[in-house]
Structure formats: structure tokens, C-alpha cells
């Protein structure tokens, strides 16, 4: 039986959480949406359902989260983790409050914690105020976020209008006093009819104490940091089977390929470095709009003739992206490029013996994952923070090694060093 079932409000956040559990020694499987067919997840101790619900209307986010909960319950999970961003991305309408309310009520529970903190990544909560990169949230740049501007760092004030629960605080003094004191504080808050307590955390020790104090709660809500505290508690109680082997995947097999549809600054630098090392084919977006199928066939014929890793990329610098977008329409180009890279991924895997695939770009990764008809991902070793190798589940044939990198993640040598991290 899994020890916990997690519901993440976006894909990269789900992967981040899954990697944290692996780091803590728990075998972890991530699904893409709520699985529509049975999934063999073996001895996984943690299941993470990746939704894309952060910016949906609240009722839709609630509906999808409850579907995820139901699936996780059917897999035997008894404790649940609602994962959101460490900058508490939300509006006065939601979705952190409404989803927490709905999960609490579906679980028949009256209390949970809210802890976005992840001090190692410079997200700390002190007296209920969230600091990002060492400044108050509303001075961190998040006040200008296009979808979820965060104009107040006081999380009790941010959360209260979103939820039916009374919001309270577990402060750093309580956490410093240890697990028993924190449990007592939880009991006290419950006595005061508080339903969600923001929790401070300014270092990993705070997360460790909170993890142990939350062991009996049916629901926790947090960023990815609390995963470390929970995993530590399981380890102390001898509940984890694999320990340091938790992220072990089957050895890589087959040809290696890199597909890039991300135009972010980090990816452009990574593509430049990879193109200097591997045979590379540029899918120029304008050309793709003009003679897409022909260009696709050329790319595949080219890759069939190469030895070793290949790089196929649409990534272009901002001025070129703008030019093509102006000519053909932003959405049209985006969709065409995504569809092309997805079709290439399928052909590389089904016809050209590719068994290790690295994909750059969040939306691009989504398109590739759909095209490859993947039910889930076993999470393996991290290449860089937030980007692990994974192994596909629920696909006909041999499992693939897959790494999905969203735009700005990874060091400049990411595409070159990645293969060495896959034993
Ligand atoms: P990131 O994670 O960097 O945001 P995404 O894959 O999520 O990357 O988004 C990049 C978007 O840009 C995709 O829709 C992709 O199809 C599109 N795209 C890729 N290359 C080009 C290009 N040369 N011109 C215009 N759009 C492009």
C-alpha cells in the first residue's frame, strides 16, 4: 500500500514533489492526470497525480482534485498531500483554499496545515509571512505575476478569503519546541475551530518536526519541502523499503535523442552546447508552417542515418520567435511545433530504436507524453534539481527512460551530462 497519495496542481510541481520523496528514500510514481486505465505501480510508496489545475476556475480545480483523490483512495492511499507552488500562487477566488476545503470535507476531516516553505530553495515562512529569495513575497517579483499576482506576504490574510475554514498559525517557536509541542499546538488550534494552520518553517529542522507532527493527519497541504519531513518520519518508523535505492531505474537501453521545443534562455544555452557535441537538426518554425510534413520526413530520414545521440530542436531566440509568431499567429505556431516534435518522438521510439529521450519545454513535454501514450512515470535520479530521469509505466513494449525539462530548469551542460546520470 502506498504511504501517501499526492495531488499536484501542475506538472513540474508534481515532478518536483516526486523528486523530493525519492530523495527522502521513498519509491515514487507520478501519473499524468488521473489515470484512465489500470496502472501497475509495483512497490511505490508514494503516488503523485499531476493535474494542471492551478489556474482553472475554482469549481473545475475542485472537481479534478476530487477525481484524483478518489483514484488515490482506490489505490489504497490513506493519507493525502495537496501540493501547490512554494510562492503560494493563488487569487482571492482560489485555488488553494477551495481545493483544501473540498479535500478536507471529502476526507471527513476538520484540520490541515498549509506549508509552502522550502528553505533550501529560499522559500521560508516566519510568523506567517512568506519570504521568497529572502525578501517578502510581495517584493519578490511575484506581485507582478501575470495570472496570480501576490500582493501580500501574510499567508493568513491571503488564505482566509479563499476558504470556509478559520485560518490559524503554527509559529516557529512551537516548531523549535519539538514534535510534541507542535502536536499540542495542533490540538489547541482544533479546539479553537481553526481548520487550516499556516505553518512557519525557516530550515529543514522545522520541516522535520512538522512532518512528524502531521503523521496522523489525513490531509496535508504544502509546497514540496514538507515531503522531506514526512519521508524522514517514515524512515524513522522503518516504513521505507528501498532507502537510498528508491530512485533506481532499469539501466538505459537503445538510442539517445533530445527534442527541444523550449525557447527559454536556459534551454537556448543548453541547445547550443548540445549542438556542438551531437548531430543536430533544426526544425525552423517558419519552414514547419510552410511545408510541415516534408520537413518532418526530412528530420526523420536524417536521424535514421545518424549514430549515437541526436538533437532535434525548434528552439529559437526571442526575435525569431516573435517574427514567426507575427507572421503565422502565436497559437498556430506553438501548436504546430508541439505536434511536430510529438510526432517525431513517436517515430523515434517506435521505428528508430530510441530508448532514452530527453525533452525540453513544459508544453512540449506534455505533447510528447500524450503522443507516447504514457500512463505514469517511475521517478529516478535527478539530473538537476527538479528534473529527474523517469521510466515509463503502462506503455506497450519496453519502458523508456524519459527526462522532461521545463524551460528554465537545468545547468548549461544539462543535455550533455544527463546520460551519465542514468546508470
Ligand atoms: P518552456 O517550458 O520553455 O515554456 P514550452 O514547451 O512550454 O517551453 O513552450 C514553448 C512553446 O513555444 C511551445 O508551444 C513550442 O511549440 C513553441 N515554439 C517552439 N519553438 C518555437 C519557434 N521557433 N517559434 C515559435 N514558437 C516556438
Image (spheres, rainbow, N blue to C red):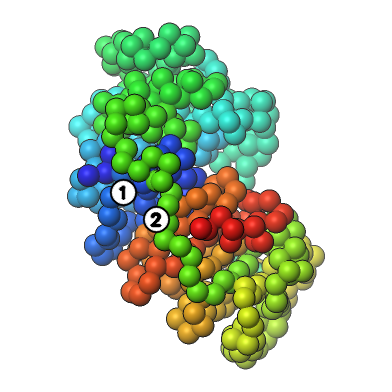
Dot 1: element = loop
Kindly identify the residue that appears in the image at 43 percent across and 23 percent down: 208
Q: Is mark 2 within 8 Å of ligand 1?
A: no
Q: Is mark 1 within 8 Å of ligand 1?
A: no
Q: How many numbered circles are shown?
A: 2
- Compared across the picture, whether 197 is left or right of 401 comes to left
Kindly identify the residue that appears in the image at 55 percent across and 35 percent down: 87
Image coordinates of residue 102 in percent, x first then y, are 29, 38
Q: Which residue is mark 1?
A: 44
Verify CB contact (< 8 Å) between mark 1 and mark 2: yes
Above or below residue 277? Residue 171 is above
Image coordinates of residue 180 in percent, x first then y, are 33, 11
Does residue 265 show up? yes
Query: Neighbour class for label 2 at 10 Å: few (<14), some, many (≥20)?
Result: many
- Compared across the picture, whether 29 is left or right of 333 comes to left
Q: CA distance from mark 1 to mark 2?
A: 8 Å
- Compared across the picture, whether 238 is left or right of 91 comes to left
Kindly identify the residue that appears in the image at 52 percent across and 68 percent down: 356
Above or below residue 251? Residue 142 is above
Q: Which residue is mark 2?
A: 378
Mark 1 or 2, nearer chain start: 1
Farthest right residue? Answer: 319
Kindly identify the residue that appears in the image at 28 percent across and 34 percent down: 239
Does residue 63 show up? no
Of the pair 399 and 79, the residue shown nearer to us: 399
Q: Quadrant of residue 337?
A: bottom right
Question: Quarter containing ligand 1?
Answer: bottom right
Of the pair 100 and 216, the residue shown nearer to us: 216
Dot 2: element = strand
Image coordinates of residue 255 in percent, x first then y, are 54, 75
Amino acid at each position: 500500500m502506498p504511504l501517501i497519495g499526492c495531488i499536484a496542481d501542475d506538472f513540474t510541481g508534481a515532478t518536483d514533489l516526486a523528486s523530493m520523496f525519492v530523495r527522502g528514500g521513498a519509491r515514487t510514481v507520478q501519473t499524468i492526470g488521473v489515470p484512465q486505465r489500470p496502472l501497475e505501480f509495483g512497490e511505490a510508496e508514494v503516488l503523485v497525480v499531476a493535474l494542471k489545475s492551478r489556474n482553472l476556475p475554482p469549481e473545475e480545480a475542485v472537481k479534478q482534485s476530487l477525481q484524483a483523490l478518489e483514484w488515490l483512495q482506490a489505490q489504497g492511499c490513506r493519507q493525502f498531500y495537496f501540493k501547490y507552488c512554494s510562492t503560494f500562487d493563488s487569487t482571492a477566488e482560489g485555488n488553494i483554499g477551495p481545493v483544501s476545503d473540498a479535500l478536507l470535507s471529502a476526507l471527513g476531516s476538520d484540520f490541515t496545515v498549509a506549508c509552502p516553505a522550502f528553505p533550501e530553495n529560499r522559500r521560508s515562512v516566519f510568523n506567517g509571512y512568506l519570504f521568497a529569495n529572502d525578501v517578502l513575497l510581495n517584493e519578490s517579483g511575484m506581485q507582478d505575476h501575470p495570472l496570480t499576482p501576490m500582493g501580500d506576504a501574510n499567508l493568513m490574510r491571503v488564505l482566509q478569503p479563499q476558504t470556509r475554514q478559520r485560518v490559524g498559525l503554527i509559529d516557529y517557536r512551537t516548531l523549535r519546541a519539538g514534535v510534541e509541542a507542535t502536536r499540542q499546538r495542533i490540538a489547541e488550534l482544533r479546539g479553537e475551530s481553526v481548520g487550516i494552520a499556516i505553518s512557519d518553517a525557516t530550515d529543514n529542522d522545522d520541516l522535520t518536526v512538522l512532518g512528524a507532527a502531521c503523521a496522523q493527519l489525513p490531509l496535508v497541504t504544502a509546497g514540496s519541502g514538507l515531503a522531506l519531513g514526512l519521508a524522514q518520519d517514515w524512515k524513522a518508523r522503518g516504513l521505507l523499503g528501498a532507502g537510498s535505492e528508491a530512485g533506481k531505474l532499469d539501466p538505459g537501453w537503445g538510442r539517445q535523442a533530445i527534442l527541444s521545443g523550449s525557447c527559454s534562455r536556459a534551454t537556448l544555452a543548453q541547445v547550443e552546447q548540445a549542438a556542438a557535441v551531437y548531430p543536430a537538426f533544426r526544425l525552423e518554425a517558419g519552414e514547419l508552417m510552410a511545408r510541415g510534413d516534408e520537413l518532418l520526413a526530412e528530420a526523420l530520414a536524417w536521424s535514421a542515418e545518424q549514430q549515437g545521440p541526436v538533437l532535434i530542436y525548434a528552439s529559437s531566440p526571442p526575435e525569431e520567435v516573435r517574427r514567426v509568431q507575427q507572421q503565422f499567429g502565436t497559437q498556430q505556431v506553438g501548436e504546430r511545433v508541439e505536434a511536430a516534435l510529438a510526432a517525431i518522438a513517436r517515430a523515434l521510439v517506435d521505428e528508430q530504436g530510441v530508448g532514452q529521450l530527453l525533452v525540453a519545454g513544459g508544453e512540449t513535454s506534455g505533447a510528447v507524453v500524450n503522443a507516447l501514450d504514457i500512463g505514469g512515470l517511475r521517478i529516478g535520479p535527478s539530473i538537476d534539481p527538479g528534473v529527474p530521469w523517469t521510466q515509463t509505466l503502462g506503455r506497450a513494449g519496453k519502458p523508456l527512460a524519459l527526462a522532461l525539462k521545463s524551460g528554465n530548469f537545468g545547468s548549461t551542460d544539462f543535455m550533455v551530462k544527463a546520460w551519465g546520470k542514468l546508470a
